[in-house]
Image (spheres, helix red, strand yellow):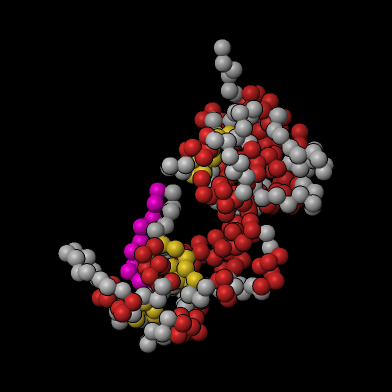
Amino acid sequence: MSELKDLDYYSKRIKKLRVDRSRGTAPYQPLLLLALFELVEQEIVTDNRFPVSPELISIFIKYRNRLSLPKFKADPAQPFYHMSKPKLAFWHLQPKPGHDLVVQSKSRLNTLQQLRDHIEYGFFDTELFELLQNPVSRNALIAQILQVWFPNKTEELQKIFEVNSFEQLQLKLKEQGGAVYSVGEIKQEEDVDSFVRDAAFRRNVIALYNQQCAFCRLRIVGRFNEDIVDGAHIKPFATFRDNRYTNGLALCKNHHWAFDRGWFSIDNNYKIVVSSERFKEDALPNTRPMRAFGGEKIALPEQERFFPSFEALEWHREYWKIAA
């Protein structure tokens, strides 16, 4: 007879979370559970699908920095992967299409890059996810985590639990108009910080352009608020470390790719300049050729302070030798 998967069942499983004790207790799995529960609490996740998102990463880091010793600096990739081991049996990984064999081979997918390459999302048992929808049972599980892994940290948790750290980063950067980083700053930062910072830039740029491609004005938003547009840099970040929003454009996948290869640029009147010698184009029925957009004004943010800077646009035209 199978064990009933109720609140008591999952409370017992929480006590069996694995932690590294070689250098003192490194409570990465309990920290990840707190981060996952907060995603449910804030209704950032509503359908039992938990991708390795910037929200998850920033929330995990928030708890790691406040509830564990300063020497523990791991990102959520390790517990995200290791918590799926059969001993716990309540956290599971959904491979990306065509990547099933990688997961079945029991390869160690314990870095952010490996997870992004092979895993679509993690998910809980259906029974556990249903318990998390109820604030009473959710708080009981949180209390269990605190009691076992973070005694005397209840007051600390209350101060940070409802702080959306990724949203705060987005708002702070938007108020500042973005940021420019030195080479030293980038080298000293963890990869996880770079991922979160880059995601904040791209999401803010997309929001400033109302989730619309500046070039063709395509706007398609998915069921879970996914966008068909990217937050693109005008001057490449790898060279200039410039995450100001005046160095950004919202572009659909096709026109992002074309912009990064100099197939078109934008003049100081915010009009499209097509570099037709760089590509051949066949006119097809019911389609608008790329050349036809030449001379049209791009879509722009509502606030002029976020318009693409002339300096960035001039750099792009000069680099690709496109005459305005």
Residue farthest to the left, as pictured: 285
Query: Is 72 in front, or is 117?
Result: 117
Residue 255 against residue 47 in the figure, above or below: below
Q: Residue 83: percent from the left, percent from the top?
A: 63, 36
Q: Quadrant of residue 125?
A: top right
Main SS of the magenta segment? loop
Give the position of the C terminus as an image quadrant: bottom left
Give the position of the N terminus as an image quadrant: top right
Q: Quadrant of residue 255?
A: bottom left
Query: Is 162 in front, or is 62?
Result: 62
Q: Residue 12: percent from the left, percent from the top?
A: 68, 25
Residue at position x 39%, y 51% from top? 222
Q: Residue 40: percent from the left, percent from the top?
A: 56, 42
Residue at position x 76%, y 47% from top? 67
Q: Residue 69: percent from the left, percent from the top?
A: 80, 49
Q: Is residue 89 visible?
A: yes
Residue farthest to the top, as pictured: 1
Q: Is residue 66 left or right of residue 293?
A: right
Residue at position x 52%, y 34% from top? 104
Query: Is 157 in front, or is 127?
Result: 127
Is residue 299 within the magenta segment? no
What is the count of numbered marks?
0
Residue at position x 72%, y 45% from top? 157
Q: Is residue 191 left or right of residue 285?
A: right
Query: Is 224 in front, or is 181?
Result: 181
Q: Is residue 159 visible?
A: no
Range shown magenta: 213-223
